[in-house]
Amino acid sequence: MSVRDLLVMRTPVPTLAGRAVLVTGAASGIGKATAIAAADAGARMVLTDIDGPRLADTVSEITGRGGRVLFSQSGDVSDHEWVSAFAAAVETDHGTMDVVMNIAGVSAWGTVENLRHETWRKMVDINLMGPIHIIECFVPQMVRRGSGGHLVNVSSAAGLMALPWHAAYSASKFGIRGVSEVLRFDLRRHGIGVSLVCPGAVATPLVGTVDIAGVDTSDPRIVAAVRRFEKRAVTPERAAEAIIAGVTGNRWMVYTSTDIRLGYWLSRKFAWPYEIGMRIANDQFDRLARVTATSAPRGDRSVRR
């Protein structure tokens, strides 16, 4: 038996061809790009997103390219009752999923004195409890079936490192990272792989429209900072390629850009320089916040990925 054969045997889902694949957040950004890429690879798709009209556009694009969508339904992954009903309908009509991809998410930034309670709550409800709802309603079927599968959870660079102004967002993204790391080992005995996706800058609708509590995002200095961010951003399609490769290669950590891989490595290997770097970054953000501050905290205008 060749080395390649051994590797394939250890990979729960070596190909997406013919596999049933669920993607949340499929109406835009990384979710849409991943849904299209998976369908192009021969997967049979189950799709959801809170944005019904744009979800319908994704379905049309996939079918127009010759792909197959088994089922699609708009809904809110933070609503456990809705997810339970959605999962029951999918299982009844289409059986157990082979791959479950938690991609839906939102983002909002701000310092603790400016963040509103509803922003903290929304980050946790959608970015952490949403994936947990999907996991608890779709993954046990994989376990009971006994023929393996793969789970994808999207975290963030903010789930690996202490990025300035990201406390509420990081609460959810560090949380899903922890869930994923435990499931990586819990599900291994069932032949179910787990991938944790940690994107850095990705050119999605979030870029340039993310709300920053207490900051005037129309200020030229903030606009310039966002443009610098955009220059480093990879396309959603590139992120989707990394996710698909993560599944078929059974990779635990999936990076969409080398800067996040390097940053995380440095944070683990060189703790003191990392701490200094974070302090410097935080000071720079603080100075920017002082000169672009609004007169009062703004409402919750968090943006979906």
Image: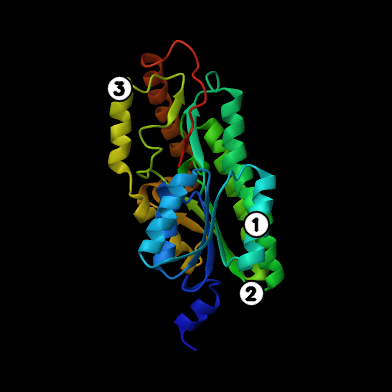
Element type where label 2 sits in the image: loop
- Specify which label sits upstream in the sequence, 1 or 3: 1
User: Picture coordinates of residue 125 (x, y %)?
Assistant: 62, 38
The local crowd at label 2, few if under 14, some if 14 to 19, many if 20 or more residues have their Cα within 10 Å, is: few
Q: Is residue 32 left or right of residue 93?
A: left
User: Picture coordinates of residue 239 (x, y %)?
Assistant: 39, 53
Element type where label 3 sits in the image: helix
Q: Is residue 131 left or right of residue 265?
A: right
Identify the image quadrant of residue 277. top left
User: Picture coordinates of residue 270 (x, y %)?
Assistant: 46, 44
Residue at the extreme right of the image, as rendered? 144
Q: Looking at the image, can residue 102 be seen? A: yes
Q: Which of 212/184 is in front?
A: 212
Q: Which residue is mark 1?
A: 87
Going by the numbered disc 2, the residue's amino acid type is Ser
Q: Which residue is mark 2?
A: 147
Q: Which residue is mark 3?
A: 221
The disc at residue 176 is none
Q: Which of 262/215 is in front?
A: 215
When the figure is inspected, residue 117 is found, relative to residue 203, above or below; the finding is above
Mark 3 → mark 2, Cα distance in angstroms: 53 Å
Mark 1 → mark 3, Cα distance in angstroms: 46 Å
The local crowd at label 1, few if under 14, some if 14 to 19, many if 20 or more residues have their Cα within 10 Å, is: some
